Amino acid sequence: MGVLAPSIIAADFGHLADELDRVARYSGLWHVDVMDGHYVPNLTIGPMIVEAIASVSDLPQDVHLMITNPADTWEWYAKAGAARIAFHPETAPDPLALLRDMRAAGVGAGLAVNPEVDADEMRPFLADVDLLVVMSVHPGFSGQQFIPDAVPKLRKLREMAGPELDLVIDGGVNEKTGPQCVEAGANVLVSASAIFGSDDPAATAKRLKAIADGAR
Ligand code: DX5
Ligand code: ZN
């Protein structure tokens, strides 16, 4: 069974608990996009929101850190209730050490792979990650167009990593692009605007969950 991971970045934050409620039954986890205004030109969520989500939902949270110096602040998110944390390897002086620190603290550890980063660059980390977040947009904003180069990259990463790794596709995922990603080996579909920007988020989430369930 695949997993649908709604990214709350496109939800209505004035009614966040209701927004989560509408799609929770089709969701396996929440994807939380943390942006700091430095690593990416956008500022979003901090640990307070992770804590707030944990207080209204039992679903696990994947925190996607798009920040400089994740080594300095990842523990805030762990304490706030993140189940897993992914960061961009170029933001950490020693990515392997950071992955190991996270796992030692009982937090799932992951790396996010930018569009210009080759799959082979992940090879040294494969034994130390629980998830890889393959970016099919340049990090920073919801609502961008899917970059199709992510599809062969998923295929290669799935071959390299084997069946156990959670291979997450993040950016521009919708009912058109989702099936290609699943076919190429993704088993977690992140989606923000396709769900929360649709007229009927629950119906869209249901269809995206069915697409994710095509995962091997
Ligand atoms: C991009 C984020 C994504 C993105 C998803 O920087 O990591 O999670 O916001 O948004 P959509 O699904 O709208 O592309
Ligand atoms: Zn993300």
Image (tube, grey):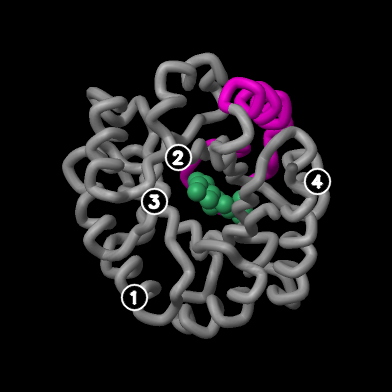
Give the CA separation, mark 2 to mark 1: 25 Å
Q: Quadrant location of the C terminus?
A: top right
Ranked by sequence position, the earlier of labels 4 and 3 is 3
Query: What residue is shown with label 4?
Result: 179
Ranked by sequence position, the earlier of labels 4 and 1 is 1
Are the two marked residues, 4 and 1, in contact with CB atoms closer than 8 angstroms? no
Q: Amino acid at mark 1?
A: Ala
Q: Which mark is residue 62?
A: none
Ranked by sequence position, the earlier of labels 4 and 2 is 2
Which is more foreground, mark 2 or mark 1? 2
Query: What residue is shown with label 3?
Result: 84
Query: What residue is shown with label 2?
Result: 130
Q: Quadrant of residue 77?
A: bottom left
- Location of residue 110 with respect to 154 vertically, above or below: below
Q: Is residue 86 left or right of residue 74?
A: right
Are the two marked residues, 2 and 3, in contact with CB atoms closer than 8 angstroms? yes
